[in-house]
Image: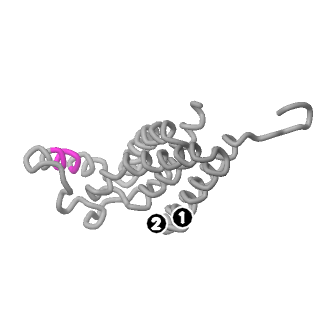
């Protein structure tokens, strides 16, 4: 607000608003279809790169690219182990491109914390908590014996347990990240 009745937004405000809109759109798709469409994730990432370049030249483009890389790298191991869908990783990357590399780290931290809370809530509400805890123990034991890797029967492809629409914790992570700024 500049004066009475005057409202101006900075480039950062637009980036934050767009990141929140992308996250909320992903929530809608993920809850309805259990998928986050590539047109949303790749489109949002491409728009963030273009906005970075248009707003601050090569430096802005570099910040967006680095944010995309951080967003992709932090959740890729969960995808590689079969515990998260590729759409969630692509969503994190796109949001990282909008928010930048430092905020992409905060986004990953807050999304992970929210994911844990939501996972417990979903497990409790579906009567699955005891099995979920047993599965965590089994995974840790498997990794100790066989090394880190996908645990047969416990990946997204093979499990019969409740599935978490991870766009919800990611959107909560965006809110928390923007709130601490």
Farthest residue toward the front? 58
Instruction: Give x and y (percent) for residue 148.
Output: 17, 49
Q: Is residue 128 left or right of residue 90?
A: left
Q: Is residue 25 left or right of residue 119?
A: right
SS under mark 1: helix
Q: Quadrant of residue 59?
A: top right
Front-lying residue, 133 or 179: 179
Instruction: Give x and y (percent) for residue 115.
Output: 41, 45
| Viewer can see residue 94 | yes
Instruction: Give x and y (percent) for residue 138.
Output: 16, 49
What are the residue bounds of the magenta stretch? 135-140
SS under mark 2: loop
Residue located 69% across and 46% down the image:
14
Residue located 59% across and 53% down the image:
48
Counting the numbered discs, the total is: 2
Q: Name the colouring of the figure.
A: one colour
| Viewer can see residue 20 | no
Tell me, yes or no, whether the two marked residues, 2 and 1, touch with CB atoms within 8 Å: yes
Residue located 27% across and 63% down the image:
159
Q: Which residue is mark 1?
A: 29
Where is 152 relative to 8, above or below?
below
Q: Which residue is mark 2?
A: 35
Distance from Cα at disc 2 to Cα at disc 1: 6 Å
Majority secondary structure of magenta residues: helix
Instruction: Examine the structure image and report whether residue 44 is included in the region drawn in magenta.
Output: no
């Amino acid at each position: 607000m500049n004066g009475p009745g005057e409202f101006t937004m900075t480039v950062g405000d637009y980036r934050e608003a767009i990141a929140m809109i992308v996250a909320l759109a992903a929530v809608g798709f993920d809850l309805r279809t259990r998928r986050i469409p590539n047109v949303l994730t790749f489109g949002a990432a491409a728009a963030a790169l273009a906005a970075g370049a248009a707003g601050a030249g090569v430096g802005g483009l570099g910040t967006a690219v680095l944010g995309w890389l951080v967003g992709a790298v932090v959740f890729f191991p969960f995808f590689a182990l079969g515990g998260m869908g590729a759409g969630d990783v692509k969503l994190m990357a796109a949001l990282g491109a909008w928010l930048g590399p430092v905020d992409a780290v905060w986004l990953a931290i807050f999304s992970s914390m929210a994911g844990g809370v939501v996972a417990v809530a979903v497990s409790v509400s579906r009567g699955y908590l005891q099995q979920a805890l047993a599965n965590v123990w089994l995974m840790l034991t498997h990794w100790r014996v066989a090394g880190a890797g996908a645990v047969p029967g416990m990946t997204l492809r093979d499990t019969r347990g409740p599935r978490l629409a991870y766009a919800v914790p990611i959107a909560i992570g965006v809110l928390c990240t923007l709130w601490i700024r």
